[in-house]
């Protein structure tokens, strides 16, 4: 929607939204869904007039969703709305020993594939047969369509063709300007990408490292396609990858000079670059799509500044190698949504919103280092090629494949919440009850859960004190993994767990840390 003089006058009649979100990509849309489901009023402003660009279509729009992202979509009833998500990895299908099994690609690190049949799934005892896939392939355009439909169904107001130009905050709220219009909100979240206006106007520091290469994503017609090989090809002068005929990704280790110089990406330029990298005289007859990017790795030193917050690429940028960016952003949205909603409704314990930065910043830093490590061994220089060979050998071992799978699939994701139980800070296993219901299905309303496998009456009484924040679930699961009870946050993370009769003091502290009851107290009777 384009701003006009007529609707500029109507700005003064706009409501005060609980949250204004900048950016209607998958991260902004998912966050909007989380907030709206928790009864918050949300305005989402997007600078692009149309929701989809050519780069979001096949094959450039293909994204790999890892285990935390797949679980998040499943737990909100969104996974089944994707038309045909393709399962590419499941640890329960992997051979425990890796012996005698046909190699199967499970993912890659810097283009080095690890064999899924070598992965030791026994190292992840909390992943049950009822767990979702650890990796799915989805089209970005379809994912955004599904999220936008859910957001609008929940009452989110989406306005397109409006780029935020300024934002000011007070102790009570935020004023946002886009062209000649303005809106008032209690909170502002920047999900507006690597060049985030919210980050820049909000005074966030964006620290990190400069790029090693310029990357190119292009769709071309090739007059002599037999001169280029499919797949990933590393040469002494760079790398080219052809996923489908004519769809190319190029890496030129120029320190990001071409991207930053704004070099026009013409047919002649791409042809010269491709010939140099591929060491062929290949001829490009037409250029349809072209974009540039780098491996610049930066992260906001704080994810919150007063009533402004950052999520997704606005909070962290890195090379798209390995497809970690979308998963990282969806994790930000899931972590932030329920905490911000609780804060808005006055149901947040002290420090709850600040735990968003505390938990997500280290995860983001890990992904940036993961990206930097890949770039370090993708350089065509001899030293990098030698390191590349060593990593390849390590990945061909059982422990190596399991380590890389845990990182690529996100299975090893963990928040340092403290607590003695090994489940604390991890995603709740998808327990399946005797009636076929799963924990994932019970999390669809975005409430926390006090899970009780022993039908302890004191736990039921405790849950009743927390209204719509916490519900009590009792019953027997098909495989309880020795667990007696668990406190599950709305994002599916285990806040507390016990294999024995609950310790009232420990449970009381855990509940008080994450929830505020209707009476303003939390206690175990």
Image: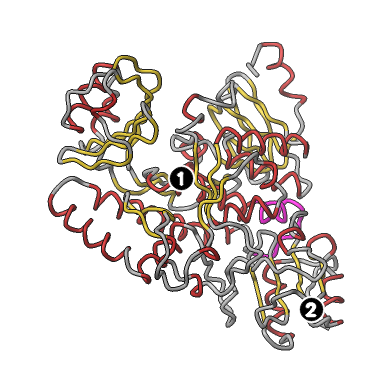
Write down the quadrant of residue 276 in the picture. Answer: top left
The residue sitting at 38% across, 65% down in the picture is 401
Q: Position of residue 328 (x, y in %)?
A: 50, 51
Residue 344, numbered circle = none
* 474 displayed left or right of 264: right
Crowd tier of the residue under label 2, counting other residues whose Cα lies within 10 Å: few below 14, some 14–19, many 20 or above: some
Q: Which SS class for mark 1?
A: loop
Query: Which residue is at 51% across, 74% downward?
Result: 122
Magenta region: which residues? 337-350
Which residue position holds label 2?
523
Q: Is 122 above or below relative to 4?
A: below
Q: Residues within 10 Å of mark 1 (few under 14, many from 20)?
A: many
The residue closer to the viewer here, 46 or 117, is 117
| 462 magenta-colored | no
- Residue 184 vs residue 412, the one in the foreground: 412
Sequence-first disc among 1 and 2: 1
Q: CA distance from mark 1 to mark 2?
A: 39 Å
Q: Residue lying at the far front in this picture: please name it.
A: 100
Provide residue 291's location: percent of width, then percent of height. 37, 27
Q: Is residue 422 above or below residue 346?
A: below
Give left or right: position of 87 versus 19.
left
The image quarter containing residue 469 is bottom right
Horizontal placement of 86 versus 102: left or right? right
Q: Please state the horizontal and vertical placement of residue 185, each as a whole percent of the image.
A: 68, 38
Q: Depth-wise, is mark 1 or mark 2 nearer the camera?
A: 2
Question: Is residue 509 toward the left or the right of residue 360 in the image?
Answer: right
**Quadrant where the N terminus lies?**
top right
Residue identifier under label 1: 204
**Residue most extreme to the top:** 5
Q: Quadrant of the C terminus?
A: bottom right
| Residue 495 in picture, x, y percent from top left | 65, 71
Q: Secondary structure at mark 2?
A: loop
């Amino acid at each position: 929607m384009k701003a006009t003089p007529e609707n500029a006058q109507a700005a003064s009649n706009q409501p005060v939204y609980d949250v204004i979100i900048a950016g209607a990509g998958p991260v902004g849309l998912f966050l909007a869904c989380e907030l709206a489901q928790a009864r918050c009023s949300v305005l989402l402003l997007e600078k692009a007039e149309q929701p989809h660009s050519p780069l979001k279509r096949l094959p450039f729009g293909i994204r790999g969703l890892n285990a935390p992202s797949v679980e998040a979509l499943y737990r909100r009833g969104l996974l089944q709305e994707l038309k045909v998500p393709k399962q590419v990895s499941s640890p329960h299908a992997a051979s425990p020993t890796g012996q005698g099994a046909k190699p199967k690609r499970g993912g890659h690190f810097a283009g080095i594939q690890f064999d899924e049949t070598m992965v030791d799934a026994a190292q992840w005892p909390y992943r049950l047969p009822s767990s979702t896939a650890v990796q799915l392939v989805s089209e970005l355009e379809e994912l955004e369509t599904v999220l936008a439909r859910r957001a609008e169904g929940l009452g989110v107001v989406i306005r397109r063709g409006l780029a935020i130009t300024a934002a000011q905050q007070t102790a009570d709220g935020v004023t946002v300007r886009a062209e000649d219009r303005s809106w008032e909100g209690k909170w502002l979240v920047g999900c507006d990408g690597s060049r985030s206006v919210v980050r820049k106007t909000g005074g966030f520091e964006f620290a990190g490292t400069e790029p090693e290469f310029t990357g190119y994503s292009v769709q071309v017609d090739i007059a002599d396609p037999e001169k280029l090989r499919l797949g990933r090809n590393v040469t002494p002068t760079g790398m080219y990858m052809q996923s489908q005929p004519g769809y190319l990704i190029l890496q030129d280790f120029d320190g990001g000079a071409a991207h930053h110089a704004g070099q026009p990406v013409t047919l002649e330029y791409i042809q010269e670059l491709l010939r140099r990298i591929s060491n062929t005289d290949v001829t490009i007859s037409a250029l349809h799509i072209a974009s540039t990017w780098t491996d610049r790795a930066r992260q906001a030193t704080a994810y919150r500044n007063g009533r402004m917050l950052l999520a997704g690429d606005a909070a962290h940028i890195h090379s798209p190698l390995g497809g970690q960016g979308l998963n990282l952003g969806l994790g930000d949205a899931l972590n932030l949504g329920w905490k911000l909603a609780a804060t808005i409704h006055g149901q947040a314990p002290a420090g709850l919103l600040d735990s968003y930065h505390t938990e997500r910043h280290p995860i983001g830093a890990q992904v940036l280092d993961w990206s930097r490590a890949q770039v370090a061994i993708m350089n065509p220089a001899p030293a990098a090629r030698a390191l590349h060979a060593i990593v390849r050998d390590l990945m061909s071992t059982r422990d190596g494949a399991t380590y890389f799978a845990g990182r690529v699939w996100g299975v090893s994701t963990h928040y340092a919440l403290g607590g003695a139980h090994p489940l604390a800070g991890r995603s709740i296993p998808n327990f399946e009850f005797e009636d076929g219901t799963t924990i994932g299905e019970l999390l669809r309303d975005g409430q926390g859960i006090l899970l009780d496998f022993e039908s302890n009456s004191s736990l039921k009484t405790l849950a009743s004190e927390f209204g719509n924040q916490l519900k009590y679930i009792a019953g027997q699961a098909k495989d309880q993994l020795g667990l007696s009870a668990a406190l599950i946050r709305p994002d599916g993370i285990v806040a507390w767990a016990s294999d024995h009769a609950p310790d009232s003091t420990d449970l009381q502290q855990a509940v008080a840390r994450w929830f505020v009851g209707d009476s303003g107290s939390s206690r175990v009777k």
